[in-house]
């Protein structure tokens, strides 16, 4: 049986998730909801500056209340209040909440009230729902969980790498810094940002902009033994997509070397966590499907005492496509529970 999906919020993450889900036979995209019109949404689905043209671009079309790809028509709604969406009539199994407007259990309840069976939020959304990074803690999910969060792109990038490091040498404390491409939460030119954030009100393509990031703290929700030990922040930089995440930690162990850490990371590589010895720059990782790709050239180790070391490790990720790939893996797992 196909899983019927509704995408709420057809922005960067909503559209990129559409692209991946569309090619998977087990899913049917049964509805889309956004504030913008179907014709503009169809246009933005076809063409994309950072991720390239949609493979099926020649077959994307739109009407008053639908967009179509190939000969499949997908109902399109322009409803700001999720509780008024016809999820019950459309028999929606999972709402992918990608609008950024329903970032809590309480707010996302609106989709359940509208008749959807489950909600997956594409962002951190509080401690009263499960926060899941696929490949790290999806086995904590149960069929009782109706609203879940797929965490943030940075948490998805950080958690697999931190888990491997912590299994190798116990982490006492850690600090993350994400060097992050700009996103729609920033302004193109200096102007008041919607949420009144000062630095995000400054021209995104012209500045290095320090900002907050909950990603490191959120790793504690995913790997409970690290709860309270990790902190971090981000700097937004003038690239439209692509991130480098660095993690500096004090770890317990003996004879820790950069070479050993790299070997451990390499042998732990999977389809979720990549490993490279290539001389990547950010544009090289755009469009990849790993949660993150460990960059062995960035590993540093400094000895503090016989059983304590300071280490710095780093990984690349595409804040859009890496994250969306993780979200799709999560939905596949969740819908098979
Ligand atoms: N972009 C990333 O790198 C990234 C990575 C991981 C997670 N996320 C998270 O994913 C979510 C979406 O991010 P995004 O970058 O895709 O944002 P985005 O490009 O701004 O897309 C959000 C879309 O939802 C629409 N929208 C706003 N309120 C709505 C409502 N009440 N009902 C339906 N649609 C509504 C927006 O319309 P308007 O533009 O008219 O408001 C916009 O088209 C955020 O929570 C973000 O934190 C983003």
Image (cartoon, rainbow, N blue to C red):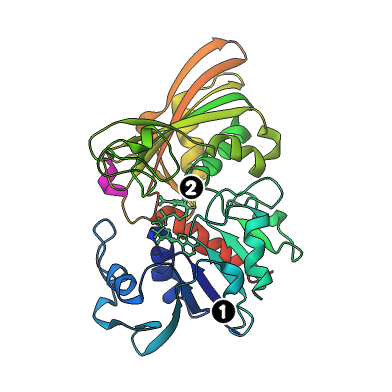
Q: Which residue is drawn at 46% across and 20% down?
A: 301
Q: Which mark is residue 4?
A: 1
Q: x%, y% of residue 256?
A: 53, 22
Q: Residue at x 26, y 43 (%)?
A: 239
Left or right: where does residue 86 sit relative to residue 200? Answer: right
Query: Looking at the figure, which quarter contains the N terminus?
Result: bottom right
Mark 1 to mark 2: distance in Å? 32 Å
* Residue placed furthest toward the bottom: 71
Q: Residue at x 28, y 40 (%)?
A: 204
Q: Is ligand 1 less than 8 Å from the beta carbon at label 2? A: no
Local packing at callout 1 (Cα closer than 10 Å; few below 14, some 14-19, many 20+) is: some
SS at badge 1:
strand
Q: x%, y% of residue 66?
A: 40, 83
Foreground: 94 or 177? Answer: 94
Left or right: where does residue 274 sit relative to residue 107? Answer: left
Left or right: where does residue 8 sit relative to residue 11? Answer: right
Dividing the picture into quadrants, the one containing residue 243 is top left
Q: Residue 269 carries which label?
A: 2
Query: Looking at the figure, which quarter contains the C terminus?
Result: bottom right
Foreground: 251 or 10? Answer: 10
Counting residues from the start of the chain, the first of labels 1 and 2 encountered is 1
**Taking 310 as reference, is 229 above or below it?**
below
**Taking 99 as reference, is 285 above or below it?**
above
For the magenta stretch, what is the residue range?
279-285
Q: Is residue 183 magenta?
A: no
Q: Closer to us: mark 1 or mark 2? A: 1
Dividing the picture into quadrants, the one containing residue 149 is bottom right
Quadrant containing ligand 1 reads bottom left
């Amino acid at each position: 049986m196909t899983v019927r999906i509704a995408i709420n919020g057809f922005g960067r993450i909503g559209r990129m998730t559409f692209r991946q889900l569309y090619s998977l036979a087990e899913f049917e995209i049964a509805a889309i909801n956004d504030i913008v019109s179907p014709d503009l949404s169809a246009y933005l689905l076809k063409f994309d500056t950072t991720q390239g043209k949609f493979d099926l671009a020649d077959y994307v079309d739109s009407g008053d209340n639908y967009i179509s790809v190939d000969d499949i028509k997908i109902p399109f709604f322009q409803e700001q209040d999720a509780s008024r969406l016809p999820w019950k009539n459309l028999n929606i199994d999972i709402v992918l909440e990608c609008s950024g407007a329903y970032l809590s259990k309480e707010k996302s309840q609106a989709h359940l009230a509208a008749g959807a069976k489950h909600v997956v939020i594409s962002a951190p959304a509080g401690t009263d729902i499960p926060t899941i990074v696929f490949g790290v803690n999806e086995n904590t999910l149960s069929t009782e969980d109706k609203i879940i969060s797929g965490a943030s792109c940075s948490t998805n990038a950080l958690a697999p790498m931190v888990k491997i490091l912590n299994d190798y040498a116990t982490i006492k404390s850690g600090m993350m810094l994400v060097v992050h491409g700009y996103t729609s939460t920033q302004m193109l030119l200096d102007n008041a940002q919607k949420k009144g954030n000062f630095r995000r009100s400054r021209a995104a393509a012209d500045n290095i902009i320090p900002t907050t990031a909950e990603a490191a703290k959120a790793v504690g929700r995913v790997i409970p033994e690290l709860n309270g030990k990790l902190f971090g922040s981000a700097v937004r930089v003038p690239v439209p997509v692509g991130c480098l995440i660095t993690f500096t930690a004090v770890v317990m162990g003996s004879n820790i070397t950069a070479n050993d850490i790299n070997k451990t990371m390499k042998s732990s590589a999977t389809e979720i966590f990549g490993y490279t010895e290539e001389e990547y720059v950010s544009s090289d990782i755009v469009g990849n499907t790993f949660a993150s790709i460990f960059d062995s050239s960035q590993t540093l180790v400094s000895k503090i005492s016989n059983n304590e070391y300071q280490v710095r490790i780093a990984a690349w990720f595409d804040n859009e496509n890496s994250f969306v790939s993780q979200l799709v893996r999560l939905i596949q797992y969740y819908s098979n529970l």
